[in-house]
Image (cartoon, rainbow, N blue to C red):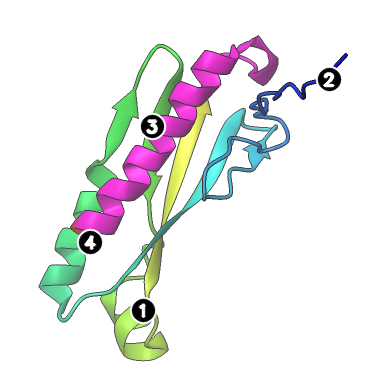
Amino acid sequence: MRRTKTKTMALYNILTGNLYSYLDTPYDKENNKIDVYCSAHWTADNEEEYQTKEDLIHAYENETELFSMSCWCDISGYDYWVIQQGEENYVSIDVCLKKQPKEYSQEEMQLIRDAIVEADYYFENNL
């Protein structure tokens, strides 16, 4: 009798940060949210452009029956990041969960993962 290997699907797990994307997705138990550092790092050529990009980040929101997503960046500003540090700023994505992590189905966790990746993609292409 020939044995065949069966593939097992990797299980999503919010508590351990396993959402199987290219991003780190650690869970913040105290605030019941997923903290994501976006892959997009950004800068600007002048203060006006910097403010426009900062506003774009803060304006990004996504809310469903599963979560509420908001985005932010360090608000030290153009002078700090571009003039003083000469470094790029970062984008953080906060995914506030509307249920406890263990209450989400695998399909729901996949939808959350997809929304995180979509936000990351948006910033990669718009900053």
First along the sequence among labels 2 and 3 = 2
First along the sequence among labels 2 and 4 = 2
Query: Residue 6: which quarter of the image?
Result: top right
- What amino acid type should be assigned to the residue bearing mark 2? Arg
Q: Which residue does the numbered mark 1 point to in the structure image? A: 81
First along the sequence among labels 3 and 1 = 1
The reply to whether the magenta stretch includes residue 107 is: yes
- What amino acid type should be assigned to the residue bearing mark 4? Leu
Q: Residue at x 37, y 75 (%)?
A: 88
Q: Which residue does the numbered mark 2 point to in the structure image? A: 3
Of circles 2 and 4, the one toward us is 2
Question: Where residue 121 sits: x, y (%)?
Answer: 31, 48
First along the sequence among labels 2 and 1 = 2
Q: Residue at x 33, y 39 (%)?
A: 118
Of circles 3 and 1, the one toward us is 3
Q: Residues within 10 Å of mark 3 (few under 14, many from 20)?
A: some
Q: Which residue does the numbered mark 4 point to in the structure image? A: 127
Q: Nearer the viewer, residue 78 or 109?
A: 109
Q: Nearer the viewer, residue 78 or 90?
A: 90
Confirm whether residue 112 shows in the render. Answer: yes
Can you name the residue that lies furthest to the left here? 48
Indicate which disc residue 115 carries: 3
Q: Secondary structure at mark 2?
A: loop
CA gap between label 4 and label 1 equals 15 Å
